[in-house]
Image: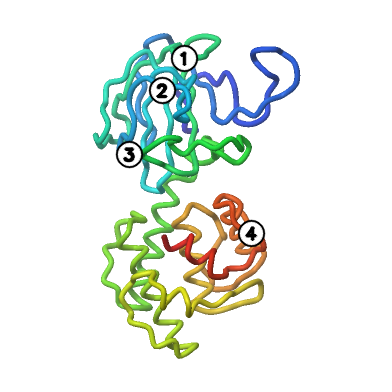
Amino acid sequence: MPFRDYRVTSKFGYRRDVWTGIGFTFHTGIDLVKYHKASIQAFTDGEVIFAGMGRTGTGLGGFGNVVLLQDKNNRGQLYAHLDSVSVQRGQYVKKGQVIGEQGDTGKTTGSHLHYEVRKKAETQPPYGWTSDRTNNCLDPTKYLQNYRDNKHIIQDIQSGLNTKYETGLSIDGISGPLTIKAAIKGYQVELNKQFNAKLNVDGIWGQKTKAATVTIASGAKGNITWILQAMLYIKGENPKGLDGIFGTNTNNAVKSFQQKESILIDGKAGKVTWEKLFL
């Protein structure tokens, strides 16, 4: 379990309103307790994109002293209500590194760590926060349980891109811009091969590639579907396999991604969905 060193005082999801005791509100993270001013260590590697007192209206208001990390999946890991912080913006921290102390700053009912995983790691306000609380964050327990597996999946994707398209990627498990560029190259190769699109295979999502884009949906098979599944994994969705078959799991992953990006939720990979995946 990722939180074995803590006592869980409030889980992710709906809970009775802690301020009024009336009705239920959605808790976007998990509340964890060691003891007041206990050292808080990073649960994963990441870059600090905010450290200090969160201000009202920035997406960090009410959380007191916070550390916000951008992880390898471009998720925002928020460590909130800290008594003090010991890292600064732009610093890269390793898993297990101390980033602050447990506290009760901000709006709290007592000393604890509020830890949440925001779907987007944004470096400016609102720092990945949205008013849609039920879709704003991921379940932090499940996210950390699967975090190591994500690296292996990205490595499989990188290996597949090298094998299929000779992209020369490093098999490092990091879903960065080079991996996305390689996926675009593969997509351009497939558009040329299957639809005679006559594109330059440059890994750039430009107007010509966008214009040549095809829509695929449930029942589709082949390398374009494989690239779709790869990009869904890179963007943090889970199509449950890199088999090149557009089945129920891939359809659900597309819908989840579309909902997250606030675009038409139709379960099809069309121009807008591909663009959101590649950018």
Q: Which mark is residue 264?
A: 4
Report if the CB atoms under discs 1 and 4 are less than 8 Å apart: no
Image vertical order of residue 207 relative to residue 144, above or below: below
Residue type indicated by callout 4:
Leu
Question: Please, which residue is most extreme toward the right here?
Answer: 23
Question: Please, which residue is most extreme toward the bottom here?
Answer: 196
Report if the CB atoms under discs 1 and 2 are less than 8 Å apart: yes
Q: Which residue is mark 1?
A: 106
Report if the CB atoms under discs 3 and 1 are less than 8 Å apart: no
Task: Using the numbered discs, state the Cα–Cα distance from disc 3 to disc 2 in whole angstroms.
Answer: 22 Å
Asked whether, in this view, residue 172 is left or right of residue 236, the answer is left
Q: Which mark is residue 45?
A: 3
Image vertical order of residue 130 relative to residue 173, above or below: above
Residue type indicated by callout 1:
Gly
Residue type indicated by callout 3:
Asp
* Label 2 CA crowd tier, 10 Å (few <14, some 14–19, many 20+): many
Q: How is the image coloured?
A: rainbow
Label 3 residue SS: loop
Q: Earlier in the sequence, mark 4 or mark 2?
A: 2
* Label 3 CA crowd tier, 10 Å (few <14, some 14–19, many 20+): some
Q: Earlier in the sequence, mark 3 or mark 4?
A: 3
Image vertical order of residue 208 relative to residue 90, above or below: below
* Label 1 CA crowd tier, 10 Å (few <14, some 14–19, many 20+): many
Q: Which mark is residue 54?
A: 2
Q: Earlier in the sequence, mark 1 or mark 2?
A: 2
